[in-house]
Amino acid sequence: MASADFSGIALVLLAAGQGTRFGGGKLAAPLAGEPVARHAAAMLGALPFAARFAVVSPHTPDLGALGFGALMLEPSGAPQSRSLAIGVGAAQAMDARAVLVALADMPLVTSGHIEALVASFDGKLIASSAAGRPMPPAIFAASYFPALGKLSGDRGAASLLAGAPSIAISAAEALDIDYPADLAKAEAQLARR
């Protein structure tokens, strides 16, 4: 595998979700002594991206100390597609060659998986995949920025990821904190590491 070239790649961490299935406040919920959002942010913040942006709400834990510039989701409560457009707009403004999109409610993704994605990026598009389903984290070349900015609804970039090349991610790493029971699963996974 080629080495991971992070130059010109901006990171966009989507961290403004309302967590309605969770009952609200999931990104601030404690997981192994830290808010859920800080797990993903700490791992990603240690990697040499050209820039790091977090699209946030007033309820998102502060991620500034982990190297993230905060981009407030406006209007508050807007769907994931709006968060994506805001983050991609910031990447476009800095003339990034690509953007890696990650989710703050996926706290178990490893730096090794991110490095594999970056090393396998062909200059166009690459996704993660679990059970054959493409998903974030994913990298989009600048040529995708206009399409990412025009998405609507709460499905994010799923339509653009259909059929994309991908790197497999384990079910454990792909755990998405949607419900309170998912916190217990994540705690168990972290205890095994």
Image (cartoon, rainbow, N blue to C red):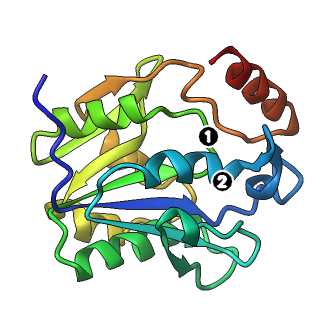
Q: Secondary structure at mark 1?
A: loop
Q: Are marks 2 and 1 in contact (CB under 8 Å)?
A: yes
- Residue nearer the viewer, 115 or 103: 115
Q: Along the polypeptide, which appears first: circle 2 or circle 1?
A: 2
- Residue nearer the viewer, 187 or 141: 187
Q: Residue at x 49, y 59 (%)?
A: 13
Query: What is the quadrant of residue 72 in the picture?
Result: bottom right
- Residue nearer the viewer, 114 or 86: 114
Residue under pointer 2: 37
Residue 107 circle label: 1
- Which amino acid does the dot numbered 2 rest on? Ala
The image position of residue 82, as x and y in percent, is 50, 72
Left or right: 112 as drawn, with respect to 54: left
Query: What is the quadrant of residue 169 in the picture?
Result: top left
In the picture, the quarter occupied by the N terminus is: top left
The image position of residue 74, as x and y in percent, is 59, 84
- Which amino acid does the dot numbered 1 rest on? Pro
Residue 150 circle label: none
Q: Secondary structure at mark 2?
A: helix
Marks 2 and 1 sit apart, C-alpha to C-alpha, by 7 Å
Q: Residue at x 25, y 53 (%)?
A: 140
Q: Is residue 73 above or below residue 179?
A: below
Left or right: 27 as drawn, with respect to 167: right
